[in-house]
Image: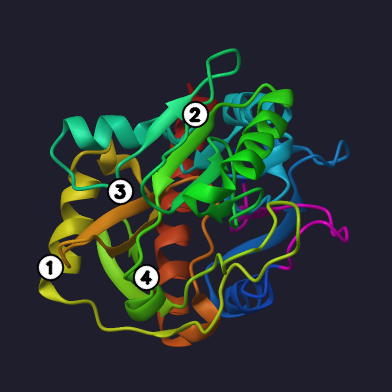
Amino acid sequence: MMNGHARIALVTARPRPEVNTDWDMPLLHTAFDHADATAEIAAWDDPHIDWAGFDLAVIRSPWDYSWRSSEFLAWVDRCSEVTQLANPPEIIQWNSRKQYLLEMYERNVPIVPTRYIVPGDPINLPRDHEFVVKPAVGAGARFAARYQPIERERATAHAERIHTEGVTVMVQPYLTRIDVTGERALVFVRNRFLHAIRKKAVLPPGLRYDEPRDAHPGTEPWEPTPAEMALAERALAAVPEADKLLYARVDMADGEAGDPVMTELELVEPGLYLRFHQESIPTFVNAIVEVAKQSRALRESQSII
């Protein structure tokens, strides 16, 4: 029989210069001081951690996974065998490769038009409009850049570099309205709207794909429009087994016609912008504790049997 509070792992990456800092983590961790559970910050690749000792592992900021995806996804499978993982492994595996955008499109979710170029295929790039090249496994705009048609030679070299990693290339039109109206991110917890932010464009002209960039420039709290909320809810409704989601972030920007289109559906390790909406932290903590307690109760019942 288990005793004591439910134990929760807040999963992150080990601090290294190339890994972005999770500014939300201290705020989230501290909030558990007043919760009916205990939480520990744990690096996903720490070999000394016994994941079976946790009732729930909440993936928060393993932000080196985009260049260690095979290792990370293998850990997801191992961890989920000994404890409950949030979000669930089947959703993580599905969302970790951005081909999910095509499935969203097939389910009538408006998305930014996207073309995929797998390693070995010819690299044909647009000749009549500005476009973005980025990897199909990525986070924080890593290895992404925008190009004018006259920069196709540089863009081709960029795509070839992505292919050397065995990763599929994504090519999308650059949504020019983003330079004016920015990008919005709507955050949901257990499929209920929590809060939203708006940020400025991430990719300035001329920024090389391998140069440092601010993934969250000019971030500010945002009140979503009815059209933005409808798009986010439509996207979540199209997620396989969406009822199992603990958290979700739907990113969007204005398309050429001025209506919002989804740019990303973040279900693996999204930043939730808690530092801009600290009033939302208790709601998120309560949701985590509720799921952890459910997991603990199930494990206790199985141990009795």
How far is disc 3 from disc 1 in space, using C-alphas? 16 Å
Give the secondary structure at mark 3.
loop
Decide: is 103 above or below 254. Answer: above
How far is disc 4 from disc 2 in space, using C-alphas? 29 Å
Q: Nearer the viewer, residue 253 or 64?
A: 253
Give the secondary structure at mark 4.
helix
- Residue marked by disc 2: 93
The label number, if any, that marks residue 227 in the structure image: 1
Mark earlier in primary sequence (1, 4):
4
Give the secondary structure at mark 1.
helix
Report whether 146 appears left or right of 10: left
Proximity of marks 1 and 4: CB atoms separated by less than 8 Å: no
Asked whether residue 14 is drawn in magenta, I would say yes
Q: Which residues, given as a range, are shown in magenta?
A: 3-21
How far is disc 4 from disc 3 in space, using C-alphas? 12 Å
Mark earlier in primary sequence (4, 2):
2
Horizontal and vertical percent for residue 207? 66, 63
